[in-house]
């Protein structure tokens, strides 16, 4: 029996044949080890659709066939199927629908929905991406043009937009030299140079009307009418936005009512512009390209920069949505109802945004004071964990109307370590008083870039020479589509200073970085949660003891400085030198206490680590291990034959005989601590999940929720596939 889908369009036209070859090359590239074409094939396919919008229908039909192949393979070998091609096919399908400026037949939409429904049987995260794609397709079916309209109005912060977004790109100055910074800034700031609000509004109105009305919309006449009434196009733009939002949010009257509204807007535009048609003799068509969002690029020199950016964005959104009087009333209410009676303790809102307290010892302190938070605010802090909890009822869907801050960090493991500290600090501040969370959705993205040459050293070489892109490798293993499109972007970024002076490069080629970044922002909606670990270090300087609390996400290295040279010395051929070195460090130099990885998590192991120069601790996320989050601890012995490795989630390390450790976090020399006697490491608890109640008060809903939710803080890096650890 012939598969009805396979029988469609057996004889492909030249355009269809070209698209088919593109799709097959794209999927084949997923299994390739070569990095030469990664990311470029996807970009070329999207550019081809921009040049020929009619090809989107043929492309969607081909992608349906690919989904059929995946479904057939699931039935045959469900246990061993890797589903590697599911994500590329789904996201290419989604992007083809957004990019399409031609009407897609309802029958084709229905076929797509049927295939997507069948994909819901796949395990997470593939079913999650399939469900998200299904919801978007259904929304586009009932409200044609809605995907494009909502994406453009939010990205461009156009007038009357209920959802607004800001994009910040933070580059690590440790990686970005002055020429590289100038080149990347020049490429990304192109997005601001090509922005024209009126043109975008005209294109949006025309796109939505064409998608909704189909053949009854005379495109050239509509384009001329909009050009004639360019000075009043905002009126029609607002009507289109309202019609789309009412249809999406309320589903008032369904698709038929929505199309009637579009027809009325269409007639109003033509009627208001009839007198101007004689002035135009040429045809105009709306742009098929999605405009670039405004991108703010800066070197991330101070960790407080992230808080300042988000706080300023929050303040702007507050000024747009609420009056100053309302904001002041909210502050007074929070002081009167949530404070312990000391009104001065709560700093002014504007002061909090401008200048967070940097020296806590100089601020006013209280003893036995309790500061509560509204139940709704506490739930907002736990929103992501509640949404991920099995059987949740999406109690916080109303918060989806918040504005979105998309933060992209560029660098190696060090910049993610810096992001870890900043993110933990934000959660701590928000747990004391909600400033950002109830007004902003924070979305984090990572583009790996390094200034380090590939290392070809032996496995026994010191760990500071190891590859600084270990977390990028983790994300690439979890999400092959991220590996193809984003991990491969670092090499292209490193070459930008050379292309900046090469005038033979076309402007389209220079848009590759910008196009890929926009694709990542639009389609990278699924987070990979990287677990964070808390580090408590006891330092002794001049017989004065102090405690430092830190966090790390990927790597901790501790060594005894006076033993650093021993490993190199002992590996030299002199037997006499080897014997003398071993005698110097014979015996234990550190003591360890850790919890062994077991089902009960109760087995505690104590002991000494003899002849140890230091140790290296790396994080192993559950997303990669297919088990549970844990740490791998490798002890670096003077004698390589005595190196040992353990796995744990909690460990305490103490030096013996007056020796001291030097501790480096996330491979970042800027985060090195010396004179450390004791190090205690454990999973970092999320301050936002810490619910405190007054003595004698009854347990409320959020307290019960916090009892069962995972309280470990994770760094959510958005990818295409995603994975909860």
Image (cartoon, rainbow, N blue to C red):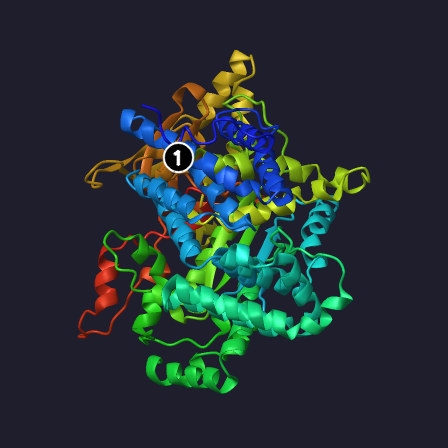
From the viewer's perspective, is residue 186 above or below residue 349? above
Residue situated in front as seen by the camera: 243 or 340 = 243
In this view of the protein, can residue 301 be seen by the observer?
yes
From the viewer's perspective, is residue 466 above or below residue 193? above
Residue situated in front as seen by the camera: 585 or 439 = 439
From the viewer's perspective, is residue 555 above or below residue 644? below
Give the residue drawn at x 42%, y 32%: 66
Apparent side of residue 399 relative to residue 541 in the rendered image (left or right)? left
Q: Which percent across, then down, holds residue 663?
A: 49, 43
Q: Quadrant of residue 265?
A: bottom right
Apparent side of residue 348 relative to residue 15 in the rendered image (left or right)? left
Residue that mark 1 sits on: 67
Give the residue drawn at x 66%, y 40%: 493
Q: Which percent across, then down, holds residue 592?
A: 33, 38
Q: Quadrant of residue 373?
A: bottom left
Q: Which percent across, then down, holds residue 142?
A: 40, 58
In this view of the protein, can residue 479 be seen by the observer?
no
Q: Quadrant of the N terminus?
A: top left
Residue situated in front as seen by the camera: 244 or 583 = 244
Apparent side of residue 126 relative to residue 89 in the rendered image (left or right)? left
């Amino acid at each position: 029996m012939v598969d009805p889908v396979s029988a469609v369009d057996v004889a492909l036209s030249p355009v269809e044949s070209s698209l088919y070859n593109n799709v097959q090359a794209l999927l084949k590239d997923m299994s390739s080890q070569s990095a030469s074409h990664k990311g470029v094939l996807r970009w070329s396919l999207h550019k081809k659709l921009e040049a020929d919008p009619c090809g989107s229908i043929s492309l969607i039909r081909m992608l349906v066939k690919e989904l059929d192949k995946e479904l057939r393979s699931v039935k045959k070998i469900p246990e061993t199927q890797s589903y590697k091609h599911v994500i590329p096919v789904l996201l290419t399908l989604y992007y083809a629908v957004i990019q399409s400026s031609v009407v897609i037949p309802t029958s084709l939409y229905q076929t797509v929905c049927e295939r997507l429904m069948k994909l819901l049987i796949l395990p997470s995260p593939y079913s999650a991406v399939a469900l998200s794609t299904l919801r978007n397709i259904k929304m586009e079916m009932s409200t044609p043009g809605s995907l494009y309209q909502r994406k453009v109005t939010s990205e461009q912060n156009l007038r009357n937009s209920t959802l607004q977004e800001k994009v910040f790109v933070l580059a690590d100055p440790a990686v970005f030299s002055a020429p590289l910074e100038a080149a990347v800034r020049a490429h990304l700031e192109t997005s601001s140079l090509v922005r024209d609000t009126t043109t975008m509004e005209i294109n949006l109105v025309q796109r939505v009307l064409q998608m909704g009305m189909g053949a009854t919309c005379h495109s050239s006449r509509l384009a001329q009418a909009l050009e004639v009434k360019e000075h009043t196009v905002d009126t029609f733009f607002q009507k289109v936005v309202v019609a789309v939002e009412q249809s999406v949010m309320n589903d008032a009257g369904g698709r038929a009512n929505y199309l009637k509204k579009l027809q009325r807007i269409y007639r109003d535009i033509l009627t208001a512009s009839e007198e101007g048609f004689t002035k135009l003799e040429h045809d105009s068509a709306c742009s098929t390209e999605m405009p670039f969002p405004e991108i703010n690029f800066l070197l991330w020199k101070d960790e407080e920069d992230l808080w300042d950016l988000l706080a300023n964005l929050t303040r702007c959104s507050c000024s747009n949505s609420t009056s100053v009087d309302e904001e002041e009333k909210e502050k007074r209410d929070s002081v009167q109802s949530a404070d312990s009676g000391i009104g001065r303790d709560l700093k002014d809102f504007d002061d909090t945004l401008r200048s967070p307290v940097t020296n806590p010892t100089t601020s006013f302190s209280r003893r036995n004071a309790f500061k509560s938070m509204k139940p709704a605010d506490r739930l907002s802090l736990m929103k992501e964990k509640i949404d991920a909890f099995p059987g949740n009822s999406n109690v916080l869907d109303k918060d989806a109307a918040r504005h979105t801050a998309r933060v992209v960090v560029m660098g190696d493991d060090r910049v993610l370590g810096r992001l870890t500290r900043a993110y933990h600090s934000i959660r701590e501040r928000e747990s004391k008083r909600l400033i950002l969370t109830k007004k902003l959705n924070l979305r984090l993205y990572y583009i790996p870039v390094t200034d380090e040459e590939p290392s070809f050293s032996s496995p026994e070489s010191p760990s500071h020479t190891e590859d600084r892109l270990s977390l990028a490798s983790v994300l690439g293993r979890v999400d092959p589509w991220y590996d193809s499109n984003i991990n491969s972007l670092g090499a292209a970024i490193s070459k930008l200073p050379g292309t900046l002076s090469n005038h033979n490069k076309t402007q389209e080629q220079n848009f590759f970085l910008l196009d890929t970044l926009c694709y990542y922002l639009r389609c990278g909606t699924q987070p990979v949660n990287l677990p964070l670990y808390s580090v408590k270090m006891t330092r002794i300087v001049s017989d004065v003891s102090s405690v430092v609390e830190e966090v790390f996400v990927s790597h901790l290295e501790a060594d005894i400085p006076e033993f650093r040279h021993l490993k190199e010395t002992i590996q030299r051929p002199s037997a006499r030198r080897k014997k003398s070195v071993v005698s110097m460090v014979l015996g234990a130099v550190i003591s360890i206490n850790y919890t062994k990885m077991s089902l009960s998590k109760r087995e505690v192991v104590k002991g000494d680590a003899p002849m140890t120069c230091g140790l290296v601790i790396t994080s192993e996320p559950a997303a990669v291990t297919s088990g549970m989050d844990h740490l791998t601890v490798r002890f670096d012995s003077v004698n390589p034959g005595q190196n040992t490795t353990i796995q744990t989630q909690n460990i305490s390390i103490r030096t013996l005989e007056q020796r001291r450790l030097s501790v480096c976090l996330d491979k970042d020399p800027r985060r090195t601590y010396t004179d450390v006697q004791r190090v205690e490491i454990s999973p970092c608890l999320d301050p936002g999940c810490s619910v405190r109640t007054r003595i004698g008060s009854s347990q409320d809903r959020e307290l019960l929720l916090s009892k069962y939710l995972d309280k470990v803080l994770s760094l959510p890096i958005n990818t295409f596939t995603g994975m909860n650890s």
